């Protein structure tokens, strides 16, 4: 049984497996096999740590049982991605509220089923991102990030060499303050644009390491 392979793209892998021409039509394999028919879902790994971990350990995905799922339609932390039409709004996707700014910020290019959509408005009060279909030759990359504002309560700690590792409750924040446009199949940004979006605050858990003051001073990280 084939559990993993390394090929340039998903289409070539499908052609090798089926012997028929193939093309990528969707980035989401979740609907595959819902009607009881045979289906093939292909994961193309990127050069990130988590992707490469899965490429080297396919059993992490393929050998695990299917998990039960529950749906809460009024979940306040889900932002719907909708396309207005003559008969109302059509939902084409959804995103976690705290991922909304980098993914569906105003003027972001959202990819859905091989089509490109531009975000016209991000309404965080109504948890909606309004999009329209466009024909463009670029995608967008958000600029911003998430950081810890302060530590609320350490819950566990253990020695780690000369330092100490902690796990506990923290208050964090995230904000996307700009974005870049990048032409498809190229890596260089061609333009940068400012965004005026609010800071999102949230409580979460974190792992952090505290080094001895003497070590920090020797590395020039703190003043004497």
Image: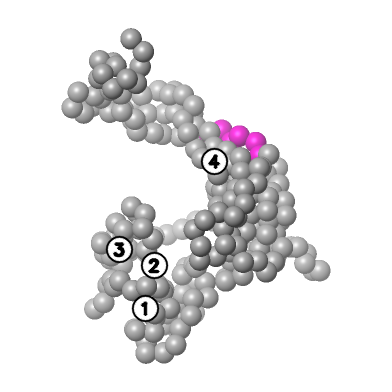
Q: Is residue 66 left or right of residue 150?
A: left
Q: Is residue 13 left or right of residue 115?
A: left
**Are discs 4 and 1 less than 8 Å apart at CB?**
no
Question: Mark 1 and mark 3: span between their CA atoms?
Answer: 14 Å
Label 4 or label 3, whichever lies nearer to me, is 4
Q: Which residue is mark 3?
A: 55
**Are discs 1 and 2 less than 8 Å apart at CB?**
yes
Q: Which residue is mark 1?
A: 13
The C terminus: image quadrant: top left
Q: Which residue is mark 2?
A: 44
Between 18 and 91, the one lying in front of the other is: 18
Image height check: is 50 above or below 151?
Answer: below
Q: Position of residue 190 (x, y in %)?
A: 59, 55
Question: Mark 2 and mark 3: span between their CA atoms?
Answer: 9 Å
Label 3: element kind: helix
Image height check: is 208 above or below 193?
Answer: above
Q: Position of residue 52 (x, y in %)?
A: 31, 58
Q: Position of residue 10 (x, y in %)?
A: 41, 74
Label 2: element kind: loop
């Amino acid at each position: 049984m084939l559990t993993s392979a390394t090929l340039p793209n998903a289409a070539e892998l499908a052609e090798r497996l089926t012997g028929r021409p193939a093309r990528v039509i969707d980035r989401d394999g979740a609907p595959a096999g819902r009607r009881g028919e045979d289906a093939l879902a292909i994961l193309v790994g990127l050069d990130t740590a988590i992707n490469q971990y899965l490429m080297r350990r396919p059993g992490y995905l393929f050998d695990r049982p299917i998990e039960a799922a529950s749906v809460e339609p009024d979940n306040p932390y889900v932002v719907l991605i909708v396309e207005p039409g003559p008969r109302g709004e059509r939902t084409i996707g959804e995103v976690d509220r705290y991922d909304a700014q980098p993914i569906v910020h105003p003027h972001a290019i959202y990819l859905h089923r091989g089509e490109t959509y531009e975000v016209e408005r991000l309404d965080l009060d109504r948890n909606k991102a309004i999009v329209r279909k466009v024909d463009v030759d670029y995608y967008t990359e958000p600029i911003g990030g998430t950081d810890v504002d302060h530590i609320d309560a350490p819950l566990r700690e253990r020695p780690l060499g000369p330092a100490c590792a902690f796990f506990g409750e923290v208050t964090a924040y995230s904000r996307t303050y700009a974005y870049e446009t990048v032409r498809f199949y190229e890596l260089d940004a061609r333009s940068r644009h400012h965004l005026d979006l609010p800071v999102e605050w949230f409580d979460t858990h974190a792992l952090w390491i505290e080094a001895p003051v003497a070590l920090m001073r020797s590395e020039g990280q703190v003043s004497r």
